[in-house]
Image (cartoon, rainbow, N blue to C red):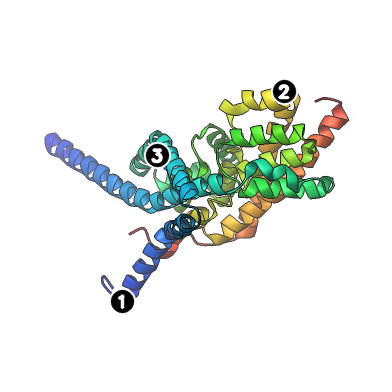
Amino acid sequence: MENSPEKKKIKEESLLSIFLFLLTVTALYEVAFLLAPEKALAALGFGWKMLTRLFPVLLLVFLMMFLSNLFIKPRWVQNQLGRDSGFKGVLMAMVGGILSMGPVYVWYGILSNFRNKGMRPALIAVFLYTRSIKLPLLPLMVFYFGMPYTVLLSFYMLLFSLPNGLLTEQLTGNQKTMEEKYGSG
Amino acid sequence: MIFNMKQQTKKSDKNSVSISAKKTGKMFARTLPNILAVVFLSGLFIEFVPIEHLSDFFGGGLLADGLIGATIGSVSTGNPLISYALGGELLDHGMSLVAVTALIVSWVTVGFIQFPAEIQAFGPRFAIIRNCLSFLFALVIAFLTIITIQFMGIG
């Protein structure tokens, strides 16, 4: 089975699924360069600038991934964030979501890893939802919309993270992730 | 014997560090193409979508405005700060607070640009359901916030 055509095909499919999005964006850039080269170049510059700003967060996420692979065992994830984690699990996902920094997509890798170790999908959705509450940006929201509006909106976003998570889990069922489907190799 | 056990523990620690490093490298290599794709797609979005003309789409009633606000927030990307500034601008242009709130909430909870990356990480069903629910809740939260503000006489 080591080098069987079936396994090779699965690896090729997995590789394609990893690069498909990036290839699509590359194709979009090619079209953009044909239609409006100046704007496309500016877009590329914007992306590069964003990437350099993201670098410290990416390093932090890489470090967290490494530490979680080294110290966090599936049994711990199952206990703290699994099906029977209860309110403690919800609270951990909420606090984690609020405190997590950087754009959401840099967290997909670590959350996917936690899911494969037993984190319940509801808590992943709760984490992703509570990321909408940005503590460092709250003063700016107060500046634009006032204190009562900011407090109310933050409260409702925190409140609705729970039904969002539970309903997502309920409706998702037992769907497998790409990693579960194709393996981690 | 104790020395032997200590040496064995050291060896197994070294082994688990190298296994974790390898695993992390693989995970990161799997995630990085999606991160790059989202970052550069955001660049295209910022350059090609005229955010300053968004107010032209509004003005069709509270629910329609809420839906448009949530849709714009869902397909938009970038720092949430942009959504606050845009929301403030739209309010100045007479847009309803429902539309602006729906835009602000969906901006951070629904991810159209990063949708392929979310599918890759959690599977299509999870990504579709989570984003659809977040879109719906953006509208619910927008209406609830405004109703609460009016009910309490604040704001």
Among the two numbered marks 2 and 3 on one chain, the one whose residue lies closer to the N terminus? 3
Q: Is residue B124 above or below residue B149?
A: below
Residue A117, which numbered label? Answer: none
The disc placed on residue A58 is: 3
Residue B13, given in percent of the width and then of the height, sits at 23, 40
Is residue B60 rendered to the left or right of residue B40? right
Looking at the image, tell me whether mark 2 or mark 1 is earlier in sequence order: 1
Whether pointer 3 and pointer 1 mark residues with C-beta atoms closer than 8 Å, the reply is: no
- Amino acid type of the residue that numbered disc 3 sits on in the rendered structure: Leu
Circle 3 SS class:
helix
Q: At which x and y percent is residue A144? A: 69, 26
What is the secondary structure assignment of the residue under circle 2? Answer: helix
From the image, state whether disc 2 or disc 1 is nearer to you. 2
For the residues tagged 3 and 1, is the chain the same? yes
Spatial CA distance of label 2 from label 3 is: 33 Å
Q: Position of residue B150 (x, y in %)?
A: 86, 31
Query: Tag 1: Cα neighbours inside 10 Å, few (<14), some, or many (≥20)?
Result: few
Chain holding disc 2: A
Quadrant of the image for the N terminus of chain B?
A: top left
Q: CA distance from mark 3 to mark 1?
A: 36 Å
Work out how far the residue at label 2 is from the one at label 1, CA to CA, in angstroms. 62 Å
Q: Circle 1 sits on which residue?
A: A5
At which x and y percent is residue B73?
65, 45
